[in-house]
Amino acid sequence: MNGYFQLEIKDEAIYLQIIPPTEGGEYCKINDIISYLEFHNITGYNTVKIKRFLQSDRKVEVLLTASTVPVSGEELVVQISDDKMTAWAKFYAPFVGGRNMDKDNIKGALMAQGVTSGIKEEAIDGFLNKREYCVPILIAEGVAPEQGRDASIEYFFETDLRAKPQLNDDGSVDFHKLNGISHVAKDSILATLTPEVRGKAGCDVMGNVIAARDVKKLKLSIGKNMSYSKDRLSVVSDVDGHASLIDGKIFVSNTYEVAADVDSSTGDIEYNGNIMVKGNVRGGFSLKADGDIMINGVVEGATVIAEGDIIVGRGIQGMGRGILKAKGNVVTKFIENATVKAGMNITTEAILHSTVMAGDSILVTGRKGFVTGGKVSAYARIEAKTIGSAMGAETAISVGIDPEEKEMTQQYQKDMAQLQKDISRLEPAVKRAISMLKSGAKTPPDKLKQINTLVGQYRTFKKEYDEKEKTLYDMFEKEKLCKDPRICVNSKIYPGVKIVISECMYIVKETMQYCQFRKEGADVKMIGL
């Protein structure tokens, strides 16, 4: 047992009794004595004299001062950690003749110092059974929150299919080696969902609740040609075909093949999978696919729309009315007099007098690698060998965030705030209504109609909120691509070309070579590659 000290009032003076340790315990420490004396406003003692007797092996009595103070009982001092997760108690012996603390006294002292939760009953009982003074005791301990686990989805097919053509040694682009399909077999598992696990809140020793972090929820979203497992935690393909992941939704399709041209012999084609055209797409006809579209020949003045990628082996001769739109990538030999829009990247060898837009980058590569005339825009990057022409063809090149999308982002945030208010307003009533229906209580027809209307409105608000949240998330992801938008010229750019980076515009005044354009502050700057 450790040594300790005790005060005694007698003969109009204060005496300090120093009790030595037993059974290998530690000697009393001077700091504990000084802190205790200061707390009781006892002064005039000789510290050197006290220190002389601390290592004594017998009980020693030292005169402190010729004054008196009220007799004090057993005392408790609490030290709370910075994170408020632990509280340590140190007990001090009563004055000779003073009262000992009982369990209620100890708990009251803890509460007086703010310790209300996680109090260790066994620590209090241990002290009461064997009183040890000037020894730190873990008297209370908070409960840390149990962190949950985010939901996760494991995909068993290639989800990042980017049609990237191979660049040959002579500078030309090989459009045959694209490998843009992820094949899946019937009855194969496409994805498995591991649901989220909610965490449990904790509490510190002062009774403050410590919340567990929010966990991310996910769900398996599927389209045609696949099924959920019985527990709805896996998705299985119903057909032999190919899988893709578009906007978080799994898509499986077969491929529709056109052996020759798309023309009057085929009519317009709309298909819920991939389309493979081995010939050309003639002017005036259209192709629409929920997957990818692959065309070996030329696209003339036609309309081609795909939820995935569009790959055109020989090029696009739009004749002023050709339109290509892909949510994924567009890869083509050339683009002339056409409108082309891709959600991701566009790769081609030449762009002539066309309107071309990409959600990520536009790469004009190969032997030619020129952009002449028209409007070409991308979120992150545009790269070409030559931009503009010596003949002064009107050419506009832009990168960066569209100001209209910025306004749309702000509006969506306002809309979501209002929707959240509406959801919070309806939620208690919806929960009461559902609880009443589950209880089996009789519900009049008019009341049931009101409940259905209420629940329908609540679900509409929730669905709209989720859709806007998804759109907003996609916008923020796109913004990440625009941290440093740039236009790279690998050979030459001609006078008259209009450069726009976000809201900043720059007109090229003279021929420049091997340069890039970036935004610096409110200006567009030209620097070397």
Image (cartoon, helix red, strand yellow):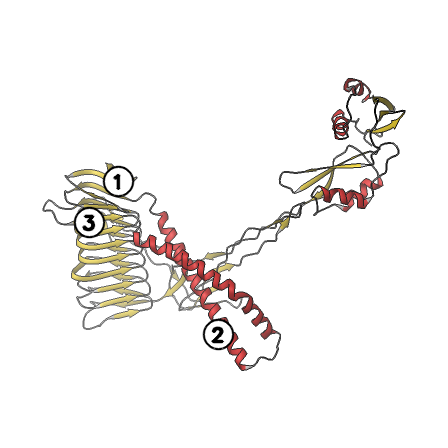
Residue type indicated by callout 1: Asp
| Residue drawn at x 56%, y 72% as measured from the top left | 433
Residue type indicated by callout 2: Thr
Q: How crowded is mark 1: few (under 14 residues within 10 Å), some or many (20 or more)?
A: some
- Structural distance between the alpha carbons of marks 1 and 3: 17 Å
Residue where numbered disc 2 is placed: 453
Residue 251 or residue 63, whichever sits in front = 63
Residue 195 visible somewhere in the drawing? yes
| Residue drawn at x 90%, y 24% as measured from the top left | 11
Residue where numbered disc 3 is placed: 396
Q: How crowded is mark 3: few (under 14 residues within 10 Å), some or many (20 or more)?
A: many
- Structural distance between the alpha carbons of marks 2 and 1: 55 Å
Q: Position of residue 263 (x, y in %)?
A: 19, 70
Residue type indicated by callout 3: Ala
Q: Name the secondary structure under disc 3.
A: strand
Residue where numbered disc 1 is placed: 523
- 151 horizontally vs 308: left or right: right
Q: How crowded is mark 2: few (under 14 residues within 10 Å), some or many (20 or more)?
A: few
- 505 horizontally vs 394: left or right: right
